[in-house]
Amino acid sequence: MVKSPLFWANWVLRLAGQQQVFSGTRAPPQPSLGDHSAARPNIVFILTDDQDLHLDSLDYLPFVQKHLLQQGTFYKRHFCTIALCCPSRVSLWTGKAAHNTNVTDVSPPYGGYPKFVSQGLNENFLPVWLQNAGYNTYYTGKLFNSHTVDNYDSPHVNGFTGSVNIDSFEASFSNVVQDFLLDPFTYQYLNSTYQRNKEPPVHHDGEHTTDVLAEKAYGFLEDAVTEEKPFFLTIAPVAPHSNVKFDGLPEPGGKFEAEFGPPIPADRHAHLFPDAKVPRTANFNPEEPSGVNWVQRLPRQSQENVDYNDEFYRSRLRALQGVDELVDGVVTRLKNHGILENTYIIYSTDNGYHIGQHRLQPGKECGFEEDINIPLIIRGPGVPKNATTEIVTTHTDLAPTILALVGTDLRADFDGEVIPTTKSTIDAAISDRHEHVNVEYWGFALGEGKEWGQGSAYSQYFLLSLTTF
């Protein structure tokens, strides 16, 4: 690969902490229109795993309500475009639908980190673009599925401050900037494995993964503030994903053996919400079958099954309490450093979740709104406070939105478009913005609770084009 003289000049200047050089066809990044200060805004992105919207999980998160919902805008009609962890995350980081990233599964040959790399996306996703825009970038938590203790260094993930890979040249700096959860331990709440920068993986047997993550996130935040440059920090806990113990790494072709169970909360949260139950909506374990195809053939759940699923639901709420505390910790530190008002905080998840709707066992991967309509909250400079909007947004919109917030150029190949974040642009979007969502899926729908004698996986393939009303 041949790099232009302008590229090398900018790379050397970045190492020296000096102003980058821009060609005559591209203007230097400008502060966000919502930012009235001279400093370019920081961004903290908190990305949970399998968090529902329709099962009311946000109602059980007091710090998310205090710091984000009351201080920002809730995008009530935000959708993922594929209800599966890895493809959804790749779409989020690239601004492209899964049929354009070609990452459509959680493991090879059709998905996972190896597929992300093989499609050239390790050199072409949001953190790389933010670095090119002059931002320091930091990440801790889950990045992709099939990012493992065996392949984390083949190659290392690009796009984060502190490690630069340019063809055969490699430089490492002393500061820690990335600390990823790795398979097969990603979903083990009490036996997680993290891998920072280019060091070997480290096991955290007996430590709760969200508490481990929180300390790493706070450390990154302190590092970012010390650098005195605008920064982008992603914090990606696995809560409230199921606790999963894999029997080794998935085989080629996506085959794996795993034991799924309810998420495990920290001990201090294990007693909470003893009376909480899955919301008894009209489609919850209906007397008459609903849905089509294999969903229509599902048997009605027994009372024992429903009781088990209610406890599964309570475990999810309890597991999220560590995330709620993390939100408070991040906001408190931003405030103490005097940078809270110049920082965007984005809170979302990769996909939604169902428990009992249409007689389904706990899981995702379906086209129902429980699985695709997910939380999105944004607070920051110019963002309306304590506001809710019903404009339609998707995960493919997040990469272009973040680039717009930092004031850099958008890409011509985005499938998404910028999400309005000011009152005037949100008001205009009510009449001007599209109301369509492209939702797609390849593979099977996996039940993550007990099997109850009815099987745990069903093949399905679909492409939906939704119009919201």
Image (spheres, rainbow, N blue to C red):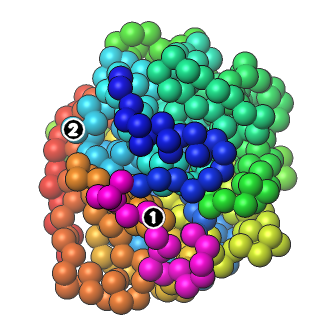
Mark 2 sits on what residue? 99
Q: Which quadrant is home to the N terminus?
A: top left
Amino acid of disc 2? His
Give the secondary structure at mark 2.
helix
Residue 144 position in % (x across, y down): 49, 33
State which region is magenta.
23-40
Q: Work out whether residue 245 or residue 113 is closer to the camera in this orientation and state it.
A: 113
Q: Work out whether residue 151 or residue 251 is closer to the camera in this orientation and state it.
A: 151
Q: Which mark is residue 288?
A: none
In the depicted structure, whether residue 390 falls above or below residue 141: below
Mark 1 sits on what residue? 29
- Chain-order first, disc 2 or disc 1: 1
Q: Work out whether residue 28 or residue 300 is closer to the camera in this orientation and state it.
A: 28
Give the secondary structure at mark 1.
loop
Residue at 33% of width from left, 84% of height from top? 425
Amino acid of disc 1? Pro
